[in-house]
Amino acid sequence: MAHMKNYTPPVGDEIILMKMGEMVLKGLNRHHFEDRLMSNARRRLQRYGKFRIYSRQSITYVEPQSLDCDMDGAFETLKNLFGVVGLSRAKACDKTPEAILETAKTYLYDDLMEAETFKVESKRSDKSFPMSSIQLSQFVGGELDEAFEHLRADMHTPDVVVHVEVRDFAAYVHANTTPGAGGLPVGVGGRAVSLLSGGIDSPVASWMMAKRGLALEMVHFFSYPYTSPEAKDKVLELARLITPWCGRMTVHVVPFTEIQEELRRSCPESLFTLLMRRFMMRISEQVALRVGAHALVTGESLGQVASQTMEAMGVTNAVCTLPVFRPVIGMDKEEIIRIARKINTFETSILPYEDCCTVFTPRHPKTRPSMEEILEAESNLDMDALIQRAMDGIERVTVEWE
Ligand code: ATP
Ligand code: MG
């Protein structure tokens, strides 16, 4: 690799290879995607030691630069890196056919014992290596076939592929890849503000949009003393639980008590939830403008509650000019819960702390509100002042993985 200046070979005998996902298809944007993936990986890996990270032909190489790098920790954290479809640990050995074969036999012993069929695929970036890629594959394949009696070569659908890569400073051997988190690198699609409640749906919705490449900031509406400090901690914990995928995040905690009390005092009870949701959307949009975000995200699911009928959503949506992404809109609760379990937010979401929405739930909420009655109800309010005071009272909390 003569084109790599100042290259420091990895230390130790293992490296990590990551295969990039659909971004490979994105033509000219590819470098932008790769750079984002690498900087996200760099940030995630800081706590696991000093690594060198670079990309070649849709593979990103993660190479330890000192012996105290935590390879297990690094591998675990990279499994959650959006933009990676598969990853594997590869073992280094001397650049001789014999050493490569020996490494395949020992390092991949378990994989080879479990498989019935296999094939060998070799790549050679060191063109001075005495065998061609095909010769090397034939040599290693032939020897493995003999050494493992139960194994059969299969070029089309092998159980295990033995990958051999001969590079400048060493040869590397690895087997099948572990599935990655998929999606697009966080941040590549820009920034959005996600409305995070203490429920099941909004953490899932946030995770889904981060998976599509959005960097998120969270907004949470907090109604102290109607809701307890524990309810707020629960929301911060939910945000923290998705940081392994989303990265470090800011949670904007908005004081919402005054607005709720004002609504209860001066507006029809049946419209309470909708008027409140409209305030949430207006304030979230202002936060978005402040932080350079270009969309909002909510955990709404069509028909799930009275404020999530099509007509009700028309009324809440009308106050926003930014696009509002609702990734769980067409999902059943069961489907949402399945994801919540997968991303480890479910158990926290079901902790029994009240949410600001449940504090003043109308007995008979309107499911088919008209815009006229909504505007009529809002005409009693000093909208700008209420919003301004809420904005002024925002507390920003940074959450990150420990
Ligand atoms: P979730 O499970 O996400 O709480 P939900 O089914 O309980 O959703 P609602 O309470 O009607 O539905 O809220 C709909 C959406 O509005 C939530 O998914 C969330 O995006 C946003 N939201 C509701 N309450 C709050 C809050 N206190 N702070 C921030 N966003 C909120
Ligand atoms: Mg809720």
Image (cartoon, rainbow, N blue to C red):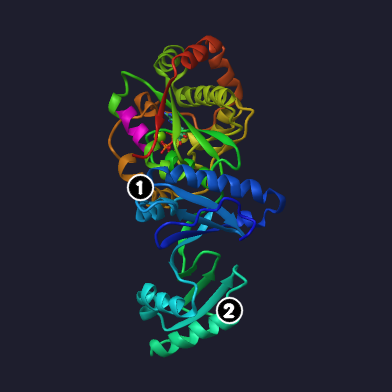
**In terms of secondary structure, where does tag 2 sit?**
loop
Q: Which mark is residue 344?
A: 1
Q: Earlier in the sequence, mark 1 or mark 2?
A: 2
Does any portion of residue 212 appear in the rendered image? no
> Compared with residue 96, is residue 92 higher up or lower down, i.e. above or below?
above
Amino acid residing under circle 1 = Asn
Amino acid residing under circle 2 = Pro
Q: Which mark is residue 130?
A: 2
Q: Splitting the image into four quadrants, where does ligand 1 fall?
A: top left
* Magenta region: 231-238
For this rendering, which residue is in front, 92 or 7?
7
> Residue 202 placed where, x, y %?
44, 39
**In terms of secondary structure, where does tag 1 sit?**
loop
> Residue 52 placed where, x, y %?
49, 50
Is residue 2 toward the left or the right of residue 14 in the image?
A: right
> Residue 281 placed where, x, y %?
53, 26
Is residue 72 toward the left or the right of residue 139 in the image?
A: left
